[in-house]
Image: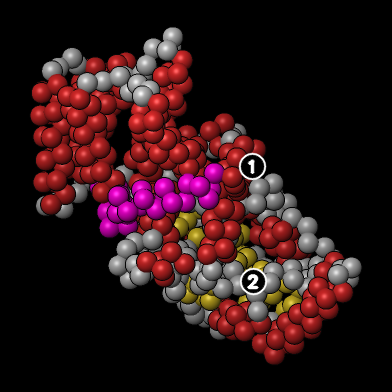
Amino acid sequence: MALWAVAAILIVSLVVLPISLQAHLVAGLTVVACMIIIKFFRAQGIWRQIALALGTAIVLRYVFWRTTSTIPPITEVANFIPGFLLYLAEMYSVMMLFLSLFVVSSPMPSRKPPQIDPHNLPTVDVFVPSYNEGADLLATTLAAAKAMTYPEDKLTVWLLDDGGTDEKCSSQNALAALQARERRAELQALCAALDVRYLTRARNLHAKAGNLNNGLEHSTGNLVAVFDADHAPARNFLTETVGYFTADKNLFLVQTPHFFINPDPLERNLGTFQTMPSENEMFYGVIQRGLDKWDASFFCGSAAVLRREALQETNGFSGVSITEDCETALELHSRGWKSAYVDKPLIAGLQPDSFASFIGQRSRWAQGMMQILRYKFPPFKRGLKLSQRLCYMSSSMFWLFPFSRFCFLVSPLCYLFFSLEIFTASGGEFFAYTFTYMMVNFMMQNYLYGRYRWPWISDLYEYVRRSIFCPPCCR
């Protein structure tokens, strides 16, 4: 403890140490050079931590200078308001950098599946929730689920059809009601042919969470595997995941990555599917592994196995937010249950094929995480460990990025069109502090995410998404 206190005092002393602009510039460029050299030689362990610590010192020096020397006087209201908003946007970015540093500075290495006792296997119910997907797509997913390597008498596959509910079949819209009845009949025939159980319900309450909970009420398996309608599992999915539950009785979740075989609309139009990393790769390749280290990897709605006993504690899947997956994991983590992330692609999924469906999907994610932040507020959620609070803060507060991006876009216009001085600094000060901060920030992101994130391209991508995600984040 004393060592940590000494280290903290040393860091604070370095951050507030008064030095000339030239000295700070030289120090910043030296840190960047050291980080490049360490990265070039692929040094890991203590050298990686040293590089990140050096970068952190430069970032904190920038924060100290930015806070004490650059904000316009409060008496100059026209300058102060946009200047302070820009400052808040920058501090949000710094906070997210440090949260990322905590989460993914040393991610969990890939796990090896525990041995499975073939004579003591748990029973498994496989849920494939559906709303408006076609029979051809569902046939592929159901057949793949049915073909998984597992004893036939311990595996039950369910199609949970929310597109053929009683409510939809008796709709006042005659055409919609006819389509719902035809859908129900078609899917019932499909399930009979594949030896899969068909299940629907009376009303479409609580969306996907309600559909999954209806499946829980009609099934009895010890474990529940969930696959979206467009996520076909590999044959070895259960043999790679079930063993974790027999090895740890406190485990409620084993999540696997979502692996997609087609480009999203942006990747297709830009032609970057095979060359540029996607946000999906960054999340499942780095972030989930980082969360797993702190026992905070969460349910992503599909390609996962959950323990029924744990779900019964929360009366099934949570449905306060529209992201029932992350909310359910948050509730169970707060009750002391554990999770595990298996960094191995075990499904073949399809991404949205239209721009409208792609934006709708991302907008639901943004809105749902904002609902979790608003109604559950992970930093003060009772039962969570400090590390889990920080992890859930990072996952939920990320979706506030449209506001910071908006401030970064508008701030230069305040000076160009209205001659407002929202950043009080000389050219030399701006170059010495801001340039070194941006270079160090770039290097730290490269250390944290490596090939999974291209900083300038990813930032541009977030600027494009800013106008789309602002409305969902405000709800």
- The residue drawn where x is 39% and y is 30% is 417
- The residue drawn where x is 10% and y is 23% is 22
Q: Quadrant of the C terminus?
A: top right
**Which of the 4 image quarters holds residue 150?**
bottom right
Tell me if residue 64 comes above or below residue 36 in the rendering.
above
Quick one: which residue is furthest to the front in this view? 417
Tell me if residue 196 comes above or below residue 398 in the rendering.
below
Can residue 431 be seen in this snapshot?
Answer: yes
Tell me if residue 202 comes above or below residue 362 in the rendering.
below
Q: Nearer the viewer, mark 2 or mark 1?
A: 1
- Disc 2, disc 1: CB below 8 Å? no
Label 2 neighbour load within 10 Å: few <14, some 14-19, many 20+: many
Label 1 neighbour load within 10 Å: few <14, some 14-19, many 20+: few
Mark 1: amino acid? Arg
- Find the distance from the CA under tag 2 to the CA under tag 1: 29 Å
- The residue drawn where x is 41% and y is 70% is 268
Q: Which mark is residue 475?
A: 1
Residue holding disc 2: 128
In terms of secondary structure, what is the magenta stretch mainly?
helix
Q: Which mark is residue 318?
A: none
* Colour mapping: secondary structure
Tell me if residue 432 comes above or below residue 188 in the rendering.
above
The residue stretch that appears in magenta: 447-470
Quick one: which residue is furthest to the bottom in this view? 193
Question: Tag 1, which secondary structure?
Answer: loop
119 or 42, which is in the foreground? 42
Verify whether residue 328 appears in magenta. no
Question: Tag 2, which secondary structure?
Answer: strand
382 or 474, which is in the foreground? 474
